[in-house]
Image (cartoon, helix red, strand yellow):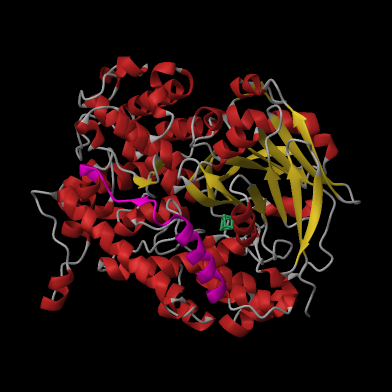
Amino acid sequence: MTVPFVQKALHIDLETGDHDIEHISASEGVIGPVDFGWREFKKDKNVFTFGEGKLASSTIPGSRRLVFCAYSDQWEGFYISSMGGAAHKFQHVGVSYVSLRGRAERPSVLLLNNRGEAPEARIIPLEDYRNIWAGYENEAGEKLIGIYAMQQALLDLFGGEYDPNRVRIATVGPSAEMTVEGVIGSNTIKKGVMQAVVDWAGRGGLGSRLFRHHNILAIMFGGEWKDAFAPKTKELNHYFEEHYGDKMTKVDMAMTKKYHYDPKLETGGTFGANYTNLKDKILTFNYRSAKRTKTERIRQHTDFIVKHYLKQFNEETIKPKRFDHCGEPCSVACKKLFGKYKKDYEPYHALGPQCGVFDQRAAELLNDHADAMGFDAIQIGGTLAWIMECVADGLMDPDKYGFPPASELKFSHFTDDVAEFDLVEDSMRNARYAMKVIDAILSDSRAEIFRDGLRAAAENINSSACFNRAVYLAHGEKGCMVPNQYWVPGMGSPMPLMGKYYVYYGSDYMPPDDLGRKNVERMVHELINDNCGECRFHRGWSEALLPVIMNDRFGLNIDFKAHHFNLAREINEYQSDTSQPWATRRMAEMLEGYLTYIAKPPTSTEEQAKYPVVDPEDPVGSARAFWRAIKEGQERAFRAGPDAISRTLTPRQQKERFAGGE
Ligand code: SF4
């Protein structure tokens, strides 16, 4: 059955509180929240948008992400960041998209509701937000801080206005006020009670943008509106049966094993699957592992991770099946919990082994503190690991910045020996040190230099030894991104938006020119998911099947690959010139280590000719040449057009490629 393709946008002027609704047709080139965000951004660089995909009211697993778009002060460019499950509640506001312009007069909360008549928007000042962040008690007498405190306070203040099962709060924390790296976080809410699962629009510092630029601390949303055409599973099964030979849930579960539970690995979730598979690709102690031998890294992986950090996780979380979903009913239930702590690989790695933390109790404390303060865990993890190495090596005077003395750290060198590193005590020592550094960055003026991010600090600290130990991707004058925690050149690529998965990040070696083309291909397909509000964990089927469902259900005739290629190309044209090559010695060491140990050496003369060699006299120069070659491959692919990147896989090809979950 074909149903109307209705897109409503709520445009809000934060200065006056005025708002109006716009109806947008697909013929205007907008079919999802990224199109909308990009269209508004092209009109006005100061706009902030968020919205859902057109299938958010369906039962399609993963279709209910809330997608935020805005200029990122952290990245110095247009950025896209999405939050799991939040559109499951946002859909009840009764609009697809929201745009925010201007700045609220005072720090405020934006309330979006729909009590059956029409979407409502109110801007409520909240002057004592700092007191709330500092501590707020819930009904059980538990003292909450930061983003958790803010959500509870808003639930207590305004929860009565919403259906307790159709409300959610997206909020920022103290890091959004003090740094450019603040996230937007949101816990799931059941029957009016905040749950342990917290989802993030985590990368790009859009929480800082929301607060520092628009004076908005939180957005509370929900309502009564229901989509009269919401497709049920029965109406959707035939797409999956036709293209994958089975019902929707079965196809989905077969292609998402890694995220739920993989019987072969006897674990699940990103934490379980990635840590099982990492082996010699492990990055620890501020990437110092990259310079060590394969044998040392494997020993560290075995003794520090498999026998302790991962073992704890498997026993405490996987065996008792402490799984939950992100807020939308999705059987994958990729959220792996232990008490109030949700465990994912990247945050628990950046704020784990990278910071010399290999024990769950220590990692829980550190991650929870960074989360409560509203930091992007990967970004702050990379910054803390760098600071800790510089302090431990005597390159940075901790006293000068309000940090504890080096004697409180166990971080002076890489170790793979449990006899010299107590996995429980030394991990806790490092975690506590890192938490004190977080507090100093937020509240001690001596640590101000770190508030503009790792790159700005590394460039301005006046120490080439410190600078050369920093790992970041640079964009624009000060823009900075700590790379995602996979030791592959793809994660250091010069794509227009880094910190996401708009890159090829397989560990197999690819000549830089091919890697560049593959990055463009991945950006196009990841954009299909983002623009449909779809969770990328379902990409095994979603990249190929969502275009079929969208076109068929809404009577559209859109070439999804061409549409999203053009979107990617426009974004690239806007901000590719501002990408900056790798600059530090540690970045060069990462490439050298990858080529030496991870990449398969060439087996033919032809391959040899294309294989980069790192010049020991000028490793940074070699690394920059490699970076430029990736960029040339990307630009060539963007110029060549959508047909030059691989065809969108048919559902059948997709099934073969992703069988068992990627
Ligand atoms: S896979 Fe996880 S994040 Fe994605 S929709 Fe399912 S529960 Fe949510």
Q: Is residue 385 visible?
A: yes
Q: Is residue 327 visible?
A: no
Q: Nearer the viewer, residue 236 or 562?
A: 562
Choose between 524 and 437: the one closer to the eye: 524
Q: Position of residue 571 (x, y in %)?
A: 50, 60
**Horizontally, is 553 left or right of 526 in the view?**
right
Q: Quadrant of residue 60?
A: bottom right
Q: Residue at x 45, y 79 (%)?
A: 656
- Quarter of the picture containing the N terminus is bottom right
The x and y percentages for residue 497 are 45, 54
361 is higher (above) or lower (below) than 626? above
The quadrant of the rendering that contains the C terminus is bottom left
Q: Name the outermost residue toward the front.
A: 43
Residue drawn at the location 40% of the way across and 61% of the way down: 503
Q: For the image shown, how many numbered marks are present on the structure? A: 0
Q: Quadrant of residue 239?
A: bottom right
Residue extending furthest toward the left:
617
Q: Is residue 577 magenta?
A: yes
Ligand 1's image quarter is bottom right
Q: Height in image: 410 above or below 613?
A: above
- 100 over 522 or under it: above or below: above
Q: Provide the residue span drawn in magenta.
A: 561-586
Q: Residue at x 79, y 35 (%)?
A: 159
As rendered, which of 31 and 393 lies closer to the eye? 31
> Does the segment drawn in magenta span residue 140?
no
Q: Residue at x 64, y 36 (%)?
A: 214
Q: Position of residue 430 (x, y in %)?
A: 33, 28
Viewed as shown, does residue 623 lie left or right of 227? left
